[in-house]
Image: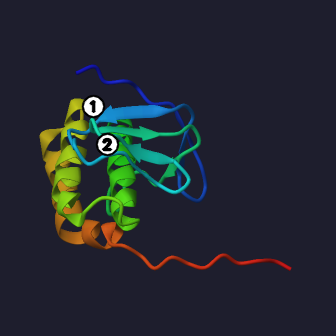
Amino acid sequence: MTIEKITYRKLRRYKYQIMEPFQYQTGLVGYGDINTKDDWVVLDNKGVLKTKKGYTWDGASGPTIDTKNFMRGALVHDALYQLMRENLLEMKHRQYADQLLREICQRDGMSRFRSWYVYIAVRSWFGKKAAQQRPVQPPMRAP
């Protein structure tokens, strides 16, 4: 499988913003076309995860640092978790998303030990809450 590089920039709030459309073959096939209301994240029927130019994500979370070999894995992982939070992808796929994070990070040059630590951190300490559906906040108006 050919792995495309991503182009991104650092932000203040979400930390990173993708500067061009991104696609990744996840292997999650046969679920129809799943997309967020605003189409920032799409998982098509063939398992291709797509993010639009301008999509933002927060990179590595927890007691770790953002490194180049973490960026693509974190992007794919965060996008899949967003689909779960929005109840568009079942929570049963959380473990697969966590494993995919580990695999992508290793392919991008992360050590096996660090990728194992990352996997344990999202599986045991940080992932469940981050993937759970949250109540939708009603729109606000001003003034």
Is residue 36 visible in the rendered structure shown here? yes
Count of numbered tags: 2
Q: Position of residue 33 (x, y in %)?
A: 36, 45
Please give left or right for residue 58 compared with residue 31 in the image. Answer: right
Q: Quadrant of residue 54?
A: top right
> Of the numbered discs in the image, which one, if any, rests on residue 79?
none
Labels 1 and 2: the sequence-earlier one: 2
Please give left or right for residue 62 compared with residue 114 in the image. Answer: right
Q: Position of residue 1 (x, y in %)?
A: 22, 21
The type of colouring in the image is rainbow
Q: Is residue 93 above or below residue 104?
A: below
Residue tagged by mark 1? 108
Q: CA distance from mark 1 to mark 2?
A: 8 Å
Q: Position of residue 46 (x, y in %)?
A: 27, 35
The three-letter amino acid code for the residue at tag 1 is Asp
Q: In front: mark 1 or mark 2?
A: 2
**Residue at image x 86%, y 80%?**
143
The three-letter amino acid code for the residue at tag 2 is Gly
Q: Secondary structure at mark 2?
A: helix
**Residue at image x 50%, y 31%?**
7
Of all residues, the one furthest to the front in this rendering is 32
Q: Is residue 138 above or below residue 11?
A: below
Q: Secondary structure at mark 1?
A: loop
Please give left or right for residue 59 compared with residue 103 in the image. Answer: right
